[in-house]
Image (cartoon, rainbow, N blue to C red):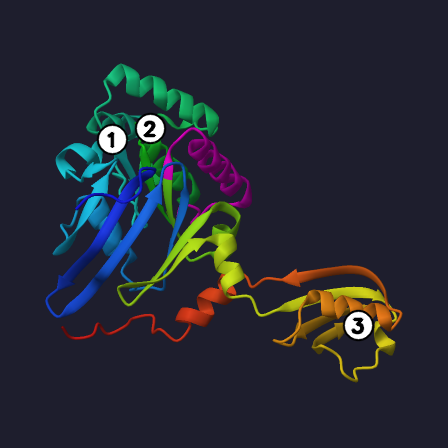
Amino acid sequence: MQPTTMDSILSLKHLRKHFESQKAVDDISLEIERGQIFGLLGPNGAGKTTLIRMITGIFYPDQGDIFFEGKKFDPLVDVAKIGYMPEERGLYKKMKVGEQALYLAQLKGLSRQAAKQKIENWFGRFGMESWWDKKVEDLSKGMGQKLQFVTTVLHDPSLIILDEPFSGLDPVNSNLIKDEIFRLAQEGSTIIFSTHRMEQVEEICNHIALVNKGQKILDGTVQAVKQQYKQHQYSVSGEGLNKLSMNQAPFTVVSQKDNTLIIQIAAQHNSSTVLRFLLEQNVEISAFHELLPSLNDIFIQLVGNTPTARTFEKI
């Protein structure tokens, strides 16, 4: 079996991973293209962490194939090209910050001299120059988060996996990390971004996949997903809306505030029909636009009834 897309940096084919009687990942296939910021979403226990651990070589799949950069994934070779920032942070608390960064960079194959140069550059970008001799245990959660991000990307990985990268960060440092994520993607890195914060996904990701109960239930660009789940609702503002005659109106009113209506267009009609109806009733329209659902709305619609701690189905 070969990867199907020439632009894919990572291709997952029918991956399965079972733990005794538990189906953690149950036939998931994904194509992740170079330079994408790919959102991997799902409720707790959906299978995201197991999937990530197979991508990083921590777990081997029971079935299926992983292709990385056009070839069958070889953990002994390819892990060095991956940067993984897990949700459960893995810093050594008793080590000094500079020593920690040097140690982790050298584990990824950098010479001490090259590692030191890159660390100094990243510390400068993040305002961390004075941290070198601090102990990791003395850092706040947000400071530790910045250090963890730096150690994840120091070796210039072609694939970066970030699990809840903004946890514990204030808005200023969240924006700092966000800017670096965009910059890394623009420079050619591919980023898998896993989070429960849907507003961050909307802002950062250009493609998403939603998994639940070990299976993929949604896969597409953010815009395409929103179009797929739209409810044909529109916002219309203008003078004269409060005098509308709703007789034979091609819509129903969902809500009204001042001179703005939220309307639901009937299935047999479209926006042109609505505009014509409003103009015929002498409404002076100042704004008219379609309302697309947020990713959070879609997430709740699809997996809102999934228990946080779910019981895996028996094989």
- Label 2: which residue? 154
Q: Earlier in the sequence, mark 1 or mark 3?
A: 1
- Residue 76 percent location from the top left of the image: 13, 35
The amino acid marked with disc number 3 is: Phe
Disc 3, SS: helix
Q: Which residues are magenta?
A: 164-190
Which residue: 52% across, 54% down? 223
- Most extreme residue toward the top, as rendered? 113
Q: CA distance from mark 2 to mark 3?
A: 59 Å
Q: Which mark is residue 244?
A: none
> Of circles 1 and 3, which is in front?
3
- Residue 202 percent location from the top left of the image: 51, 52
The part of the image, by quadrant, that contains residue 242 is bottom right
Q: Earlier in the sequence, mark 1 or mark 2?
A: 1
Residue 37 shows in this picture = yes
The amino acid marked with disc number 2 is: Leu
- Label 3: which residue? 277
**Residue 130 drawn above or below residue 238:** above
Q: Which mark is residue 104?
A: 1
Residue 258 shows in this picture = no
> Of circles 1 and 2, which is in front?
2
Examine the structure image and report whether residue 284 is included in the region drawn in magenta.
no
